[in-house]
């Protein structure tokens, strides 16, 4: 679980550095495609790392109590809100950022709860 959390945060940071993610979602399509094509293999690899890390955490949700799961869902929906940034929803970027922070904290909390068997 810790490895998945570290990998997902590393992928998010790498995508921010390589691709200006998630800010790039506000850019015109031509600019997005140009930036993507400039470093396509690395960007695809980091998105795959992000996806794989998230998939590794799915079983964790089944092991948590309802209120732990609910907080995880709030974090996930906030991260997902970043998609709306490309549609011009200004608060989406802030929600996305807050979601990643909440999600990182949730992972630590979930790990401690599972370790203590709360």
Image (cartoon, rainbow, N blue to C red):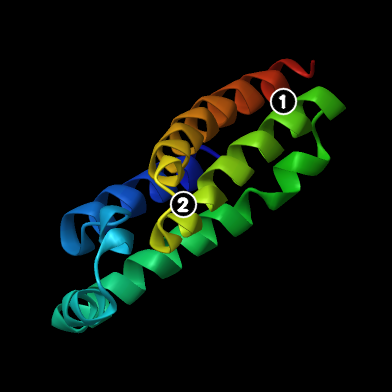
Residue 100 percent across, percent down from the top left: 46, 38
Q: Are marks 2 and 1 in contact (CB under 8 Å)?
A: no
Residue 36 percent across, percent down from the top left: 23, 77
The residue indicated by pointer 2 is 82
Residue 54 higher or lower than 70, as above or below: below
At 40% across and 49% down in the image, what residue appears?
7
Q: Quadrant of residue 117?
A: top right
| Quadrant in the picture for the N terminus | top right
Residue 97 higher or lower than 117, as above or below: below
Is residue 6 or residue 15 the one in the foreground? Answer: 15
Q: Quadrant of residue 25?
A: bottom left
At 76% across and 31% down in the image, what residue appears?
70
**Circle 1: is it few (<14), some (14-19), or many (20+) Cα within 10 Å?**
some
In whole angstroms, how far apart are the C-alphas of marks 2 and 1? 29 Å
Direction from residue 77 to residue 28 in the image, left or right: left
Kindly state the secondary structure of the residue where label 1 is placed.
helix
Residue 62 percent across, percent down from the top left: 82, 42
At 66% across and 35% down in the image, what residue appears?
74
| Quadrant in the picture for the C terminus | top right
Q: Among all residues in the image, which is located at the extreme left?
A: 38
**Circle 2: is it few (<14), some (14-19), or many (20+) Cα within 10 Å?**
many
Is residue 29 or residue 50 the one in the foreground? Answer: 29
Direction from residue 104 to residue 37 in the image, left or right: left
The residue indicated by pointer 1 is 114
Kindly state the secondary structure of the residue where label 2 is placed.
helix
Return the disc, 2 or 1, that comes first in the chain's sequence: 2
Direction from residue 27 to residue 59 in the image, left or right: right
């Amino acid at each position: 679980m810790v490895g998945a959390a570290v990998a997902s945060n590393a992928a998010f940071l790498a995508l921010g550095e390589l691709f200006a993610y998630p800010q790039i979602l506000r850019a015109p399509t031509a600019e997005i495609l140009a930036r993507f094509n400039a470093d396509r293999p690395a960007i695809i690899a980091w998105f795959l790392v992000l996806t794989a890390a998230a998939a590794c955490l799915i079983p964790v949700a089944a092991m948590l109590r309802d209120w732990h799961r609910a907080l995880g869902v709030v974090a996930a929906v906030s991260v997902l809100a970043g998609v709306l940034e490309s549609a011009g929803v200004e608060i989406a970027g802030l929600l996305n950022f807050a979601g990643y922070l909440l999600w990182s904290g949730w992972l630590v909390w979930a790990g401690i709860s599972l370790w203590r068997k709360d």
